């Protein structure tokens, strides 16, 4: 499931890479993005999720000659899962389990470059899956059978960040607010991801090919 979900992003990256070869007038035409950090559950979400170390992967594609850019991003957030009510067909709740998200958000953003610094904001929507663990207990055999439940949902996400130019790449820190349009554990899913990472400038690399 992971590979099937990431395939559209891989194809999108290939397509925009071809496009960037022909259009490299902007210094920030094409960046790849890789970040690490934590996603902090907000409101009711903190009743069943606690933050764990998370990762994000994405691409920034400049649109036109101004500061607009397209921002597809995959959020691979991780949470500690403390289940409140058991799923249908299960008698036990999971405590201190691990939950993972596979969420794709496609946003439109604007970047303002000031010397070596850049400031940007973005807003968009998407969707994907949040996996939550399940445990079936067989008292006769003294066995616990672990499984994952796939919770499909749509999301909206908006946020912003700061970048510092290192030459061929930018160091960045980014914060956003993510809202889910489907409830988990009968509670709304919303969280604040904060990540820090690197954005290699692929425009410069492609211009040398």
Image (cartoon, grey):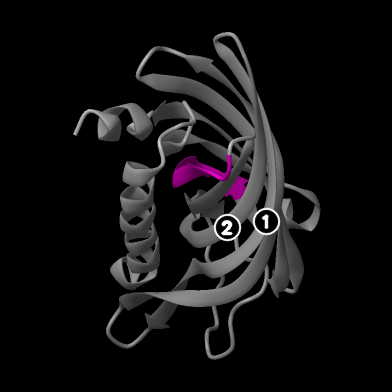
Residue ID at (55%, 37%)? 38
Position of residue 14 in the picture relative to residue 16 (left or right): left
Residue range in magenta is 50-64
Q: Is residue 26 above or below residue 140?
A: above
SS at mark 1?
A: strand
Q: Which of 133 and 197 is in front in this view?
A: 197
Q: Is mark 2 on a helix, strand or loop?
A: strand
Q: In this view, does 115 lie to the left or right of 11?
A: right
Mark 2, other Cα within 10 Å: few <14 / some 14–19 / many ≥20 = many
Pick the front one: 207 or 99: 207
Residue 88 vertical position relative to residue 76 in the rendered view, above or below: below
Residue occupying image coordinates x 45% and y 32%: 25
> Compared with residue 185, is residue 159 higher up or lower down, i.e. above or below?
above
| Lower sequence index among marks 1 and 2 | 2
Which residue is under mark 2?
Answer: 106
**Residue 107 in the image: x percent, y percent?**
62, 53
Mark seen at residue 75: none
Which residue is at 32% across, 43% downward? 21
Question: Foreground: 31 or 49?
Answer: 31
Where does label 1 land, which residue?
Answer: 124
Specify whether 167 is left or right of 196. left
């Amino acid at each position: 499931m992971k590979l099937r979900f990431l395939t559209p992003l891989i194809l999108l990256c290939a397509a925009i890479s071809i496009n960037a070869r022909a259009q490299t007038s902007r210094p920030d035409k094409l960046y790849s993005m890789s970040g690490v950090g934590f996603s902090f559950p907000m409101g009711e979400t903190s009743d069943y999720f606690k933050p764990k170390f998370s990762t994000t992967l994405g691409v920034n594609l400049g649109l036109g000659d101004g500061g607009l850019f397209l921002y597809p991003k995959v959020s691979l957030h991780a949470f500690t899962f403390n289940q409140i009510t058991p799923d249908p067909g299960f008698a036990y709740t999971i405590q201190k389990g691990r939950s993972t998200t596979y969420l794709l958000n496609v946003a439109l953003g604007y970047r303002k470059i000031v010397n070596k610094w850049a400031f940007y904001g973005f807003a968009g929507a998407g969707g994907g899956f949040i996996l939550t663990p399940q445990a079936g207990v067989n008292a006769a055999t003294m066995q616990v059978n672990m499984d994952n439940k796939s919770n499909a949902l749509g999301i909206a996400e908006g946020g912003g960040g700061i970048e510092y130019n290192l030459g061929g790449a930018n160091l960045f820190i980014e914060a956003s607010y993510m809202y889910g349009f489907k409830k988990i554990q009968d509670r709304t899913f919303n969280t604040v991801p904060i990540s820090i990472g690197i954005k290699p400038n692929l425009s410069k690399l492609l211009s040398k090919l």
